[in-house]
Structure formats: structure tokens, C-alpha cells
Image (spheres, rainbow, N blue to C red):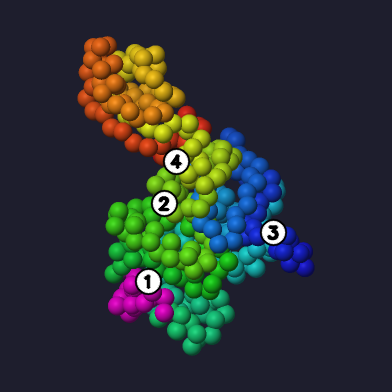
Amino acid sequence: MDHQVRAGESDDIIRTVDLVKQYPGMDGRALDGLNLAVRRGEIFGLLGPNGAGKTTFAGVLTTRVVPTSGSAFIAGIDVARHPALVKQISGIVSQQNTLDRQLNVRENLYFHGRLFGIAAKESRRRADELLERFSLAKWAEQSVYALSGGMAQRLMVARAIFHNPAVLFLDEPTAGLDPQSRLALWDLLGQLNQAGQTVMLTTHYMEEADQLCDRVAILDRGQVLALDTPENLKKLVGADTLVNVKVADQAERFATVVDAGLEGVVATRVNGNSLTIETRGADRLVPRIVALAEASKIDVLDLSVAQPSLETVFINLTGKELRES
């Protein structure tokens, strides 16, 4: 078959060619000619603000969205030509809680296995094994209403990998979770990946992509702006230190002062009464900035120092905050 030939061409588990999605009445394209390849066994992140095209892209790959043009392949299988086959080899965890409220915790796993053609005895065995592995065993007979947000998310991940999918798709998996639950899910995903599971993660949390992903594609307006490891993407900034300064007023004037008087400045950005300074070198950086402010009669209200992040990369590429819609 065609997809069998393609499957042997490379070690890419996902590949798209000139993928386009144009929604009726939409100004611009949700996906604008995307060409991406995801390697087997990696955690691949799609990072961008709401409306960047992340969810649409995941929707195409999971057969929920029909592309306007272009092609997408999973394990060499053409998604548009063989959607039923693609569903058999995909695991999906969406933003919404999709657990069956009519079933208890164990039954949500057991019947998922039966739906995928797994024998009753094996489905029971796998359900109990996953409940233990995901620390949900003592809630096996409970209604899913008894689960916290983090527990429900773990159950949805367990259900998604129940049939040993080639790719696990996660769409904003930690949205709405508390910090402890978010960290627990990160740890769980890391364990799955170490066991060989390929994961495709869509998120607008830059720290999530930084912590979890082997490679990250930064999307905006349906296009890939940059694609590399988190470390290499952060090197694109060209600075090794960020200083965020909040002043009482005259932030624009202070930016001009900093550009002219502070050695090693790569860029400055003003947002209201706050100023972000990107610099090379951090030697006595804070005292030098404070001295410039005092000499210019500008009141500094707050000052913090950080390293460049994926959010810094995104702002430099797009000129807007990562979390803007």
C-alpha cells in the first residue's frame, strides 16, 4: 500500500506537506502552508498564543478537521485518505474533560479497550495496570465526578495510551490545573516518553514547552516562525540576561537613556511603565541601571533579572506577548 512505502522513508512519525486550512469567512488562514516533521520517540511542542493554529493543526492530524489543501501523514498513513486507520494509531487528550460520566473510573478504561477491539480479559488487565501506574487504583470504582482536575487529566492520558498509540496528542493538557497537578502531569509525560511514547503537545505555556519538549515549533497566524530545541531557540535572542524595570513614569525616555548609556544592550521594549532590557553580560548590571535612572531623575519602582525564555523568543519574533489572543 502507499502508506506502507511512505512509512519506511524516514524516522518521522508525523509529516505534513504544504498544509492549509481556510475556514469560511475567516480573514486569513488558520494554517498557512505548514511543513513539519515530528520524529519517533520525541516530545514535540507547538507553542503559540490562542488563534495561532495549534488546535487546528492537531485537529487535522487527529482527523477532526479536514484540511483545505496539502497533506498530512502519521506513521506514513495519509490522514485524509485513511482516517479510520489514523484513529487506530492515535491517542488524544483534548482540552475538555471527555470522560464518560455514566461509567466509573475503571470502566472508562475498560470500555475504551473494548472499543479498540481488545479482548475483555486483556482490557481488564490493562485497566488495572494503568490505574496502578497512574495512582488511580483506589478510585477505580468511583464516579469520575469524584476526581480532581489533575486526577481526571491523568485518567484521560491513561485512556489515550490504553491501545498503545503511535502518537499521543495533547491539546493544552494542563490548562486550568493547579501548579502541583501540572508538575505531576509533566512528570507522568516524561515517564511515558522515556518508555518510547511519541508525544505531540500544543500549549501556550512557555515553561511547559521548555521543560517537556525535545523540539518546539513556534506558530503564529498559521505559520512556523521558528523550530528547534528550546535551548537553541533561546539563543536566537542574542542576549544572556533580561532586566525588567518598572518606573513611575517616563519609560520611553528611560529606554532611550539605557540604549545610549548601558554597554551590551541588545534590545529594549517598553510596555506601559515597564521596560525590558535584553543585554549581553551581567557584570554589575543592576547598579549600572539604577545609576542611569538616578542620573536621569527617573524613579525605579521594581527591578528583576532573568534569563531569556521561549516567551522572549516569541515576543522578538512576533512583537507581542505569548499569551495574547
Q: Earlier in the sequence, mark 4 or mark 2?
A: 2
Alpha carbon of mark 1 to alpha carbon of mark 4: how far?
Answer: 30 Å
Is 186 one of the magenta-colored residues?
A: no
Residue 134 is labelled as 1
The residue at the point 34 percent across, 53 percent down is: 176
Answer left or right for 37 relative to 265.
Answer: right
Give residue 148's quadrant in the image: bottom left
Q: Single out the mark in the foreground, 3 or 1.
A: 3
Which residue, given by chain and number where applicable, does mark 3 sit on? 10
Query: Residue type at mark 2?
Result: Gln
Q: Position of residue 16 (x, y in %)?
A: 66, 51
Q: Are marks 1 and 2 in contact (CB under 8 Å)?
A: no
Which residue, given by chain and number where applicable, does mark 2 sit on? 211
List the single residue furthest toward the front: 283
Disc 4 crowd rating (10 Å Cα; few below 14, some 14-19, many 20+) is many
Query: Residue type at mark 4?
Result: Leu
Q: Are marks 2 and 3 in contact (CB under 8 Å)?
A: no
Q: Position of residue 266 (x, y in %)?
A: 44, 25
Alpha carbon of mark 4 to alpha carbon of mark 3: how far?
Answer: 29 Å
Which residues are drawn in magenta? Answer: 129-145
The residue at the point 60 percent across, 35 percent down is: 28
Answer left or right for 323 relative to 31.
Answer: left
Answer left or right for 307 relative to 161.
Answer: left
Which residue, given by chain and number where applicable, does mark 4 sit on? 310
